[in-house]
Amino acid sequence: MPASEARLVLVTAGAARQAHSIARRLVDERLAACVNIVGPIRSVYRWRDAVEDEAEFLLLVKTRASLLGRVERRVIELHSYEVPEVLALAPSGGSAAYLGWLLESTAAKPISAKTRATRKRGRPGKIGKI
């Protein structure tokens, strides 16, 4: 996978529990190869004409460019913020081995040979009602 296909997505969350929940779901669903949770951090930002100063947790989401739309939609679904941060950055380089792992980890789950064989001949041990 060329570095141009990798993306680092920044997401902030207001609580450690929510950050962990979002990270776990993105990795479980193969939308991210890895999510680092950094924090607590301090965020100073403007929201509805007021300057806010809050503790947050920063998620560093490693994914591929083709999954950005799905990552964004999933973060919005899982997040409590009205406007969650989803900011994608494109790296200019990276280790070939790491980029290969990122690609493999975000690919659709491969079907095992055993599963393919079972699908071809039907599930063993299934008996219909008599």
Image: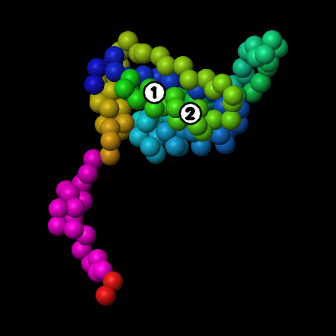
Depth order, front residue of 119/19: 119
Question: What residue is drawn where x is 32% and y is 41%?
Answer: 108
Q: Is residue 115 left or right of residue 16?
A: left
Q: At numbered mark 1, what does the secondary structure look like: helix, strand or loop? A: helix
Q: At numbered mark 2, what does the secondary structure look like: helix, strand or loop? A: helix
Q: Residue furthest front?
A: 130
Q: Is residue 18 left or right of residue 105?
A: right
**Residue 94: image location, x then y, percent:** 35, 19
Question: What residue is drawn where x is 28% and y is 20%?
Answer: 2
Quadrant in the rendering for residue 6: top left
**Residue 81: image location, x then y, percent:** 69, 30
- Disc 1 marks a residue whose amino acid type is Gly
- Disc 2 marks a residue whose amino acid type is Val
The residue tagged 1 is 69
Q: CA distance from mark 1 to mark 2?
A: 10 Å
Question: What residue is drawn where x is 77% and y is 24%?
Answer: 54
Residue 46 appears in the rendering: yes
Depth order, front residue of 25/100: 25
Provide the residue span drawn in magenta: 110-128
Q: How is the image coloured?
A: rainbow
Quadrant in the rendering for residue 98: top left
Question: What residue is drawn where x is 78% and y is 16%?
Answer: 48
Q: Is residue 81 above or below residue 87?
A: below
Q: Is residue 64 above or below residue 74?
A: above
Q: Is residue 111 above or below residue 71?
A: below
Location of the C terminus (image quadrant): bottom left
**Residue 89: image location, x then y, percent:** 47, 16
Which of marks 2 and 1 precedes in the sequence?
1
Location of the N terminus (image quadrant): top left
Residue 6's mark?
none
Residue 75's mark?
2
